[in-house]
Image: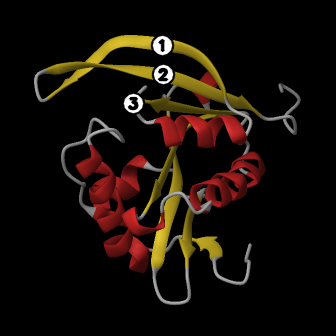
Amino acid sequence: MTDQYHVIRKMTVEDWPAVRTIFEEGIATGNATFETKAPSWEEWDAGHLKESRLVATDSEKIIGWAALSRVSGWCVYAGVAEVSVYVSTGERGRGIGKRLLQALIPESEQSGIWTLQAGIFPENEPSITLHRKCGFRQIGRREKLGQMDGQWRDVLLFERRSTVAGVG
């Protein structure tokens, strides 16, 4: 998927240094994840589905990424995946996250995923807006789910059902 400035393509192992840097920028905001440091490539690779990993590039560098991870090892949840979308600090607010998520949805459906879910901190308004624009709906709020820096944090739960899989 391309426009005159950006290309959305499959992520490769060679992309990891840039993907890791963008993940670290997200961690630094304090509103993107409970993670406090980026994992190694091996840890990240083991935790994410191989089929649905995308990067957004401009003419020179990677400026965002999106990937899916399993929510459970139980076979009944084989079609349910957690969404991660991260955009480089200097590129936020330019529609890159939306393009990544819009590309990730059909990728996930082709891989047999029928439900995408996202856990988002209530303070992360740009991510909430992005997911709503891409057809996600808020289905709950998990109160005091975990602590960061001694503060309890709530997480909003969003989901999107595939219309292709007949459950939407």
x 27%, y 35%: residue:
34
Amino acid type, residue under disc 1 in the picture: Arg
**Quick one: which residue is furthest to the bottom in this view?**
60
Q: Tell me the element at label 3.
A: loop
Q: Which residue is mark 2?
A: 156
Circles 1 and 2: CB atoms closer than 8 Å = yes
Q: Tell me the element at label 2.
A: strand
Question: How far is disc 3 from disc 1 in space, using C-alphas?
Answer: 13 Å
The answer to whether 4 appears left or right of 163 in the picture is left
Q: Quadrant of residue 5?
A: bottom right
Q: Residue 58: horizontal and vertical position, in percent?
A: 55, 82
Q: Residue 45: horizontal and vertical position, in percent?
A: 39, 58
Q: Residue 143: horizontal and vertical position, in percent?
A: 37, 10
Q: Residues within 10 Å of mark 2 (few under 14, many from 20)?
A: some
Q: Which residue is mark 1?
A: 141
Amino acid type, residue under disc 3 in the picture: Glu
Q: Which residue is nearer to you in this view: 99 or 160?
A: 99
> Which badge, 1 or 2, is on the more N-terminal residue?
1
Numbered disc in front, either 3 or 1? 3
Q: Quadrant of residue 121?
A: top left
Q: Which residue is mark 3?
A: 123
Numbered disc in front, either 3 or 2? 3
Question: How far is disc 1 from disc 2 in space, using C-alphas?
Answer: 4 Å
Quarter of the image for the N terminus: give it.
bottom right
Q: Residue 65: horizontal and vertical position, in percent?
A: 50, 62
Amino acid type, residue under disc 2 in the picture: Leu
